[in-house]
Image (cartoon, rainbow, N blue to C red):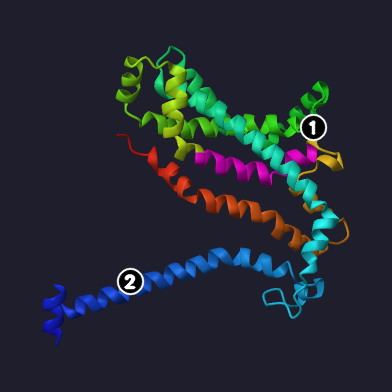
Amino acid sequence: MKQVVAMQTGFPAGAKQRKVWTRGAINAVLSLYALVTLYPLIWLFISAVKSNEEFYSRPFLLPTVWKWDNLIRAWKVSGMGLSLWNSTVVTVASLILTLILGALAAFVIARFEFKLKAFFTGLFLLGMLIPIHSTLVPLFIIMKKIGLLNTYGALILPYVAFELPLAIFIVAAYLVSIPKEIEEAALIDGTGYWGIFFRMMLPLSVPALSTVAILGFLRFWNDFAFALVFISKPALKTVPLSLSAFATGYMTDYELTMAALAIAVLPTIIVFLLFQEQIMKGMTAGAVKG
């Protein structure tokens, strides 16, 4: 029987069986890893529908009573609707500026040769080494003097400034891998540099821009320090600020805190699921030239 199986498959029966067991073991390990990775998220959503008593007494078990009204109460108490709108405005505006300015700067650095190219490249990359939170006090003084405190601009401008170095680094590394012949052919056909950028380089660099977009989205959406320092008006508070409404110096309402966190994390999950393929392409496409 083993000889018949070996003749039909081209492999000895024992080798085929070992291959099946190996594949099964790999799948089991990967499934366990996925479960461990997703468990904090699962725990968050389960905790969002627990009472405070069960949160302490049964932290890792399913709730005996599913309190779905926690989500409604958390939405109303924290003003989540207004916070989501403010975070969306700030995040979208910051992303648009970061992608446009980053792509333009990366195009110049990657496709042109000029005297101070190394200097400007190093200057942009130097921005990646600056600790963001060490600039809070100087930025606060500047924002106060120019009257930008308690405005969207107080968040948008610092976000763009600190995200640009990473955006330029990722997009420039990707653009360098695009053959020069494409650009030369476009110039021979009469296309100007603006046409090359908008019609060719920008569409070709979508994977890299998607990577920049998702990384920027995570940073802008989840930022707490800048919003806490630069925004004091309740009408302009972002999602991280609204989450702090459930904690005081004496206690924390965990059932509403977890419910609000579950609501706040949904946009991040949706964005990641929509762009995960582009993120993987952007991370690897510029790694090898040619």
What x and y, as percent, mark residue 178? 35, 30
Residue lying at the far top in this picture: please name it: 115
Apparent side of residue 19 relative to residue 195 in the rendered image (left or right): left
- The residue indicated by pointer 1 is 151
Q: Residue at x 43, y 70 (%)?
A: 29
Residue type at the position of mark 1: Thr
What x and y, as percent, mark residue 123? 53, 23
Apparent side of residue 93 relative to residue 195 in the rendered image (left or right): right
Please identify, in this view, whether the residue under mark 1 or under mark 2 is nearer the observer: 1
Disc nearer the start of the sequence (1/2):
2
* Residue 264 position by quadrant: bottom right
Q: Which residues are magenta?
A: 210-229
Label 2 SS:
helix
Q: Residues within 10 Å of mark 2 (few under 14, many from 20)?
A: few
- The residue indicated by pointer 2 is 23
- Whether residue 162 is situated above or below residue 79 in the rendered picture: above
- Whether residue 152 is situated above or below residue 248 in the rendered picture: above
Residue 91 on the magenta segment: no
Apparent side of residue 224 relative to residue 168 in the rendered image (left or right): right
- Whether residue 70 is situated above or below residue 60 in the rendered picture: above
Apparent side of residue 66 relative to residue 101 in the rendered image (left or right): right
Residue 226 on the magenta segment: yes
Whether residue 205 appears in this view of the structure is yes
